[in-house]
Image (cartoon, helix red, strand yellow):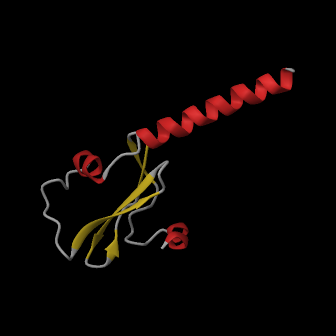
Amino acid sequence: MKKRKKRYIVSTILVLLIGVSIATNPTKKEYLQSTDWNHIPTTPSFYIERINFYLFSTYTPVVAHEHGITHLGIFGDFYQISDGQFDYPSWLEFFN
C-alpha cells in the first residue's frame, strides 16, 4: 500500500512540474524583451531562431547565416548554453 501512495505522489509532482514548465515556456517576444535586440528590425540577414520543445525552448540569433549565443528558455528565464562563437550547437542539429 505504501508503494502505491509513493507512486501516486511522485506521479502527481511530475505532472504538476510538466504542466508548470509548459505554462511558463517563454515566447520569442519575451526573449527579445530580455535582450537589447527588441529595437533591431528582423531582416533576412538577422533573425531569431527558436526551437520549441514544449517544456522549454532554445533561442539563437542568426546574423548573416552565422549563429550567435544560444539561450535556453525554461520556467520564464533564459540561460546561456553556448559560447557565442557563432557556432551552431551540435546537439541541436538532431532536431533540424
Which residue is pictured at 56% across the width and 32% down the height?
16
Q: Is residue 64 above or below residue 6?
A: below
Q: Quadrant of residue 74?
A: top left
Residue 80 visible in this rendered orientation of the protein: yes
Q: Residue furthest bottom?
A: 65
User: Where is residue 18 drawn, in percent x and y?
Assistant: 55, 40
Which residue is pictured at 24% across the width and 52% down the height?
32
Camera-side residue: 11 or 60?
Answer: 11
User: Where is residue 15 drawn, in percent x and y?
Assistant: 60, 36
Q: Is residue 68 above or below residue 30?
A: below
Instruction: Name the quarter where the N terminus is drawn.
Output: top right
Horizontally, is 22 left or right of 67 in the view?
right
User: Where is residue 2 drawn, in percent x and y?
Assistant: 85, 20
User: Where is residue 67 drawn, in percent x and y?
Assistant: 35, 71
Camera-side residue: 16 or 50?
Answer: 16
Horizontally, is 7 left or right of 33 in the view?
right
Q: Is residue 90 above or below residue 16?
A: below
Q: Residue furthest right?
A: 1
Camera-side residue: 71 or 30?
Answer: 30
